[in-house]
Image (spheres, rainbow, N blue to C red):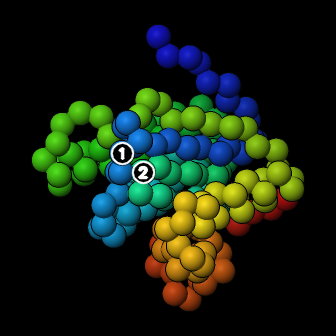
């Protein structure tokens, strides 16, 4: 039986999950783009305010706030299932793409939230897949700081 999540009204969450057996889940730009397009769709459908994100080859990080905490599980279920269907069809696979359920950490709306966003956006540097954060296309850093060159337009205004 799955453990019940503690969902808090007006709280922000750091959400993360990784590929099954720590394997890659994104192999090319098309995979990343598909996930981001689904993120855009489901964040609108479930009114999820997105403040930061980073898609890595084998895991994802999202930082945001659901308008209603009860919608967070459905938001993530739809997002992950839609990517799993894309992945399995494209790569002729069956079964799980993601390792277990996604994890969440509740974040207060203060400096800790800003630190969490910075941590998420710097993931490509720590993993040595980018020498400069501006080189990595699949992080909210690009949208926040290089807006004119950034196609996704996913972030919501953060008011602290």
Which residue is at 56% across, 89% downward?
148
Tell whether label 2 touches label 1 (CB within 8 Å).
yes
Quarter of the figure with residue 84: top left
**Count of marks, rendered view:** 2
In this picture, residue 58 sits left or right of residue 148 = left
| Depicted 79 relative to depicted 130: above or below | above
CA neighbours of label 1 inside 10 A, class few (<14), some (14 to 19), many (20+): some
Would you say residue 67 is visible in this rendering?
no
Q: Pick the residue in front: 114 or 151.
A: 114
**106 horizontally vs 90: left or right:** right
Query: At 13% across and 47% down in the image, what residue appears?
Result: 92
Mark 1, residue position = 23
- Binning the other alpha carbons within 10 Å of mark 2 as few (below 14), some (14 to 19) or many (20 upward) gives some
At x 35%, y 51%, the residue is 24
> Which residue has dot 2 on it?
58
Residue 30 coordinates in the image, percent (x, y): 29, 67
Element class at badge 1: loop
Q: Quadrant of residue 12?
A: top right
| Lower position in the chain sequence, tag 1 or tag 2 | 1
Give the label on residue 78, or none: none
One can see residue 152 in this view: yes
Q: Residue furthest top?
A: 1
């Amino acid at each position: 039986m799955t453990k019940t999540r503690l969902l808090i009204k007006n709280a922000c969450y750091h959400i993360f999950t990784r590929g099954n057996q720590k394997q890659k889940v994104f192999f090319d730009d098309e995979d990343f783009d598909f996930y981001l397009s689904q993120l855009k769709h489901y964040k609108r459908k479930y009114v999820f305010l997105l403040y930061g994100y980073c898609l890595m080859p084998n895991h994802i990080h999202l930082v945001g706030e659901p308008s209603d905490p009860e919608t967070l599980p459905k938001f993530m279920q739809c997002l992950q299932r839609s990517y799993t269907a894309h992945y399995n069809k494209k790569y002729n696979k069956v079964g799980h793409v993601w390792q277990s359920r996604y994890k969440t950490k509740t974040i207060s709306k203060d400096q800790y939230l800003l630190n969490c966003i910075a941590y998420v956006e710097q993931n490509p540097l720590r993993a040595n897949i980018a020498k400069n954060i501006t080189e990595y296309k699949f992080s909210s850093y690009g949208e926040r700081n290089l807006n004119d060159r950034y196609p996704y337009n996913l972030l919501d205004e953060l008011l602290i």
